[in-house]
Image: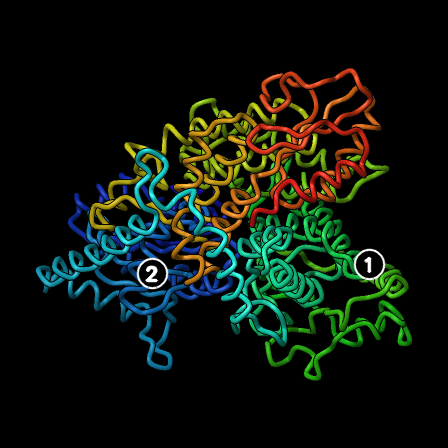
Amino acid sequence: MAERLRNQASAYLRQHAGNPVDWWPFGDEAFAEARRRDVPVFISIGYAACHWCHVMAHESFEDPETARILNENFVSIKVDREERPEVDAAYMAATQALTGQGGWPMSVFTLPDGRTYYAGTYFPPQPLQGTPSFRQVLDAVLTAWTGRREDVEESAAQIAAHLAAGQLANRQLLGSLAGAAGPETGGGWAAEALSAAVGVLSHNEDTDFGGFGGAPKFPPSPVLRFLLAHGHSSADTAPAAARLAARTLTAMALGGLYDQVEGGFARYAVDRRWQVPHFEKMLYDNAQLLRLYAHYSRTEPDPDHRRLALRVTRETGQWLTKRMVLPGGAFASSLDADTEVSGHRVEGATYVFTRAELEAALGPGSPALDLLDTDADDGASHRLPGSTLRLAAVPDADQAAVWDEARTALARVREQRPQPDRDEKVVAGWNGLTIAGLADAATALTDAGRPEPWILEAAEAAAEYLLRVQWDGTVLYRVSHDGAAQGIEGLLEDYAGAAEGLFALYAATGDPRWYDGAESLVAAACSRFLTGGTLSDTAAEPAEIRQAQGGVTAANPLDDAVPSGAALFAGVLLTSSAYSGSMRRRALAEALTAHVRRAGPAAPQAVGWALSVQQALQDGPVELAVTGADPAAVAGLLTAGRDAGGPSLVIAHGPSGPVPLLAGRDTEQPALAYVCRGMVCRRPVSTAEELREQLQTAGHAG
């Protein structure tokens, strides 16, 4: 019945191709069919690694009678939220407005024009603790459609008006971009707002276990980027920011959120202590965290903590290149939370160990066992077939060697277990963030002063894939599968995320083709997402989504698990301006982040990436151009610059070619470094010591 899903890029959609439900992918044809039949639309939204999505699919969508009810009375649409985040965002807002909560699977009922009139999340096959069964829900929404159509229309209009108000509030927060420099940009407010944000984050910190807030606890990646950047500034709050970042990064690295055997992070922890993860591993989380630990490793003075940061950087890079890389060089979207064991899906089955399994693999008296923080209930309270592995404290050099040997033995055991499924769709923006993470990790994991070749090669292969498969020179496509782009144009976050990755790769390699690629994406984003001083998250928003949102196009400046498109765009505009000297792009970056004047002190976790862009604006950003005829001497200056320059440093090296920051520099000397702000440079220096001295005073306006 669901043959339409069989050749989709999304593993989530393909998983439902054999359902008796007559699924449609999201698009005009499905809504036209609903209008032709005069029936409501049922939209089921989830993603491949979602545990409860699989549960509801097995309980309801594989049930022939439930499928009959859906097929006779609805047009049913299956949506992968990772493939169509603009669809997910619109209907998540409706679900939260109706129920006060959200989550996946999301179950939404709309008119044939896309406006919502009822919504919820997971519905069980039988009534459960006050939650109606899915069939009861179907009966209720169908009865309303057939017997109270005017009430349904009125409800849909009210929900759409509510969503329109939310989108207008987002636009008001973002402000007008006309002229690219409003009255709030470029003023003296930024330093105060950035420091105030650090104060709020300090107040909100979980001082017992790190991070912010209680359970469930997600990696706060965008705001950690800001804290690391602010910690490198001369602001009075810089030491507090650095300590905040260090405590959270250390807690996550020691806990069960991090895979202590193979590397990589789970999506979130279900508890305050980062002990028990929800085991799905997402590309976007690991891309950001890889980069954060690479940056943290450069600034952490304690050798044991620095060794831990480098270990996490290396192992996460190894996990990405072993488990997530696809033929052609791009990276898959996720690994499932569940593993199929004896015909049943078991969450975490690949990852956990009982005490007996640990002793069998390591030996009963292994010193590695003393390094672990173990549960008395051995994971039973979370219905796991064992415990996650967590280190009790930051290991010293000897303990780190012991654990490294132990994890090798445990990896051999785990390799024999069933492995979780992988969603092999390629998302452009997430691959861009991954390229950036790999590029920065390669320069942190240096080999004789040069970036680690294996990790840099992986970044270049992914970049080549994006430019070859998903970018046609005019349009960037959001997803591809099996080496072929699908017909979904990328969102603003895709264009900006891909440009972010290519700029970082240029900074790591000095290869001007990556700079050219980034600049072409930034130019395309300016033309496709900016119209008359108005920013949009989509270049071609579906009519049904615009209807669902009361006619208002989305432009959301707030971060989620990934940075907002607006914040990412501001960041690449600022980087472009630092390389090119474009004051227009710098002014636009300022305007796009002016909202942190209000939002930063009020809700810093919602605007972490924008705060980091504002920090870079305050710092300059500092620009470093390195030229010379001696590759070893050039590499030495680059290493010194990366270590001393902080996360906001913009680096140019290699052939001058299209990069204005390199134009006219002396290339005859063995190596020279130019430290600049706004392309105005200090005298060039030739030694690492001189370069470090210049960088220590070059920025620090924060």
Amino acid type for the residue under numbered disc 2: Ser
Can you see residue 341? no
Q: Which residue is mark 2?
A: 107
Q: Is residue 564 left or right of residue 130?
A: right
- Asked which secondary structure carries label 1, the reply is helix
Q: Position of residue 141 (x, y in %)?
A: 21, 64
Quadrant in the rendering for residue 650: top right
Q: Which residue is mark 1?
A: 303
| Along the line of sight, the residue nearer the viewer: 340 or 162 | 162
Sequence order check, earlier mark of 1 and 2? 2
Estimate how packed mark 2 is, as few (under 14), some (14 to 19) or many (20 or more) residues with alpha carbons within 10 Å.
many
Which colouring convention does the figure follow?
A: rainbow
Dot 2 falls on a residue whose secondary structure is strand
Residue beneath the point at 62% across and 18% down: 663
Task: Indicate the amino acid at tag 1.
Answer: Pro
Give the percent coordinates (x, y) of residue 215.
53, 73
**Is 261 in front, or is 62?**
261
Residue farthest along the left direction in this orientation: 150
Image point (66%, 45%), residue name: 646
State the CA–CA distance, disc 1 to disc 2.
50 Å
Up-down relation of residue 156 to residue 122 (above or below): above
Does residue 520 sit above or below 481 in this rendering? above
Residue 61 image offset from top left, x and y in percent: 39, 59
Describe residue 347's horizontal placement relative to residue 418 as left or right. Answer: left
109, above or below 477, in the image: below
Estimate the x, y position of residue 507 in percent, counting from the top left: 66, 32
Which sits in the foreground, 473 or 658? 658
Residue that appears at 74% across and 62% down: 260
Q: Is residue 393 visible?
A: yes
Answer with the quarter of the image where residue 540 lies: top left
Residue found 73% across the figure and 77% down from its top = 374
Identify which residue, 368 or 502, lies in the foreground.
Answer: 502
